[in-house]
Amino acid sequence: MNRAERLRNHLMALPPALYLLLFFAVPSVMMLFASFRYPGEYGGLAPWYYIEDGQLSLDFTLENWLRLFESGIYLGLLFKSLGYALLTTLICTIMAYPLALMIARSQKRFRDLLLLLVILPFWSNFLVRIYAWMIIFSPQGALTIGLNHVTGALGLEPISLMFSSTAVITCLVYVHLPFMILPLYANLEKHDNRLLDAAQDLGANRFQCFWLITWPQSLPGIYAGAILVFIPSLGIFAIPDLLGGTNGIMIGNVIKQQFVESRDWPFGSVLSLVLTGITLLLVLLAAKLGKTGGANSGT
Amino acid sequence: MLEINAVSRSFGDFVALDNVSLHIQAGEFFTLLGPSGCGKTTLLRLIAGFDQADSGQILLDGKSLCALPPELRPVHTVFQSYALFPHMTVAENIAFPLRMAKMSKSEIAHRVAEVLDDVRLPDKANHCPDALSGGQKQRIAIARALVNRPRLLLLDEPLSALDAKLREQMQIELINLQKEVGITFVYVTHDQGEALALSHRIAVMNKGEISQIDEPSVLYSYPDNRFVADFIGQCNILDAKVVSSDAQKVSIAVAGLGELTATANPEITFNSGDSCALTLRPEKIRLAATLEAGSDEVLFSGKVHDMLYLGDVTVYIIELANGVLIEAMLANDAPGRTRLFDTGDAVQIAWRIDAGHLVP
């Protein structure tokens, strides 16, 4: 590569780098700065310096970071949210895989229609769709009443679906399922079916064909889908807000609470930064797995 | 060893195989040759088990294969696209059929190393298939199909993706490999040169039927019909009518050339009045400025109508006095820059009466 080519490659990387700097790096640094400051009396942040008797004093504190570890509540909530997001990703994978495989192996003329059906829910508003779930889960809803007929007949306590972790995870899966289906389909659609013929010819049965040929080649698709499902579900607050009640809240709710209701921006920044840090670590891990898994996971 | 009895297969209105029967001997290099759409690949897929025949039977060592799915047949295929698994290394690819056969790890390692030696790529074991050249991929695909020692190896146009030089080299390797392992090869190709070079026997197929099964030299010299004569190599095909025939010679009338004598396959009877065709290979025709015809030769005068200089030989299209075009071939074997005739030169051609072969 000569100098001009190298320069051109660097220039090509400039717009995404600028984007990342402007919308991720700069805000993160601002948050980091805020996390060491005191909250303002009416929300916002207190000044980070003051001048007394002509003497400049800085006003920073570690209090916000210590508060994270003082009470187990926040870390517990963080782990619980990680658990919810992982469970959501897992359920989405299990539900999306057969569907993506079916679409990828259906006749070409049906594929576009089937994909359209997958993204059809996006045509209505996100909040509207969550309100729809509130109606489905409501105590007067047919689902709850029906289920309680069954529990009643079995002599069990009546159950309530609304305001539970079940409701939150169901809705998380519902909202994020297309984000797993689409990358998985994009991956599966590119598979060479002649490889399955070859595997069968060499003695593999149907299950072995899937497990040794299709599955390892689809891992990059699963990693891509997992990232797209896991990250938004980890930070989401609208769904637990509306469907979770007190039991179903997630870390996103607390962060929103700090900024909006408690007006404690510094502590909100601390929680945000921890969440971003964990997400980054997991994405790096997934990217690494995706790289090695794509080429060599057949062994 | 492999018996195909009266097998037919249709796809809708299209008859891919029409009542095909053939027997393949153990240890044979057998080729199915024909133009695209002649049913050769369909037959291969039936033997491999990817498709089911509408009627007829396929027997391997006397046992019917029809009820067995592909994975249970002792038959492996080398695919045209190689179909190497991209997510596995070369060694893992080759180990695949052995793993499926539940062989022990040490036995697998031993066999993989052995077959990699056979195809002369021992140092590529840990490479990814994508890092190999076309010829190397081809060898690995063959190694993978051979490693489990199938009763039968099916090869579906395996050399068609390679360039001409490499193809010739791979042909020699294939012949030697088949000799070495002693496994029966069934080879599918549309390339008649490749079929002649590789095979012990060739089945020429056309429109779902078998036109002729014979050894390459028999097929080339004594075609049973016009299709085989035309499909294999270059051939002058002269339409004619039988005038009279006895055991050895048939007298025929060729349009524009008058009455000629020719030899025919003794198994085919020609009755006077039958229409037939005289097939005449270009290299069997003598060509010179002036010729003296021998007692068993026929001689014609004409002029060079067109010529194709091919380096080792030149192909001349000779226009005879009455407008008939005959293709003849001369080796450029004289020393120096050989250029014997030019377009328009007056020449004479002659051929022995047993040089041509009569087909119905």
Image (cartoon, rainbow, N blue to C red):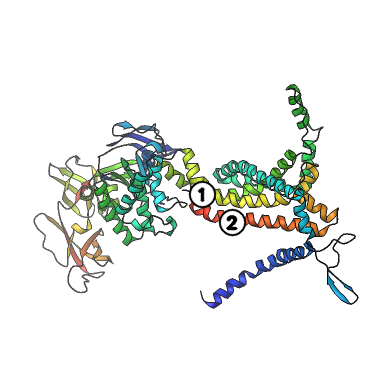
Q: Quadrant of residue B99?
A: top left
Q: Is disc 1 surrounded by few (<14), some (14 to 19) or many (20+) residues within 10 Å? A: some
Residue B219 percent location from the top left of the image: 23, 48
Nearest to the observer: residue B356 or residue B22: B22
* Mark 2 surroundings: few (<14), some (14-19) or many (≥20) residues within 10 A: some
Q: Could you tell me which secondary element the residue under label 1 belongs to?
A: loop
> How far from the left and from the top, in percent, is residue B130?
44, 57
What chain does mark 2 sit on? A
Q: Distance between the residues labelled 2 and 1?
A: 21 Å
Residue B291 locus on image (x, y percent) = 13, 64
Residue A39 visible in the current orientation: yes
Residue drawn at x 78%, y 55% is A67
Is the residue under label 1 in contact with that under label 2 (CB below 8 Å)?
no
Name the mark nearer the viewer: 2 or 1: 2
Helix, strand or loop at mark 2: helix
Residue type marked 2: Ala
Query: Which of the numbered marks, if any, corresponds to residue A191?
Result: 1
- Give the amino acid type for the residue marked by disc 1 in the picture: His
User: Subunit of mark 1?
Assistant: A
Front residue of B279 and A45: A45
Q: In this view, does B250 lie to the left or right of A274?
A: left
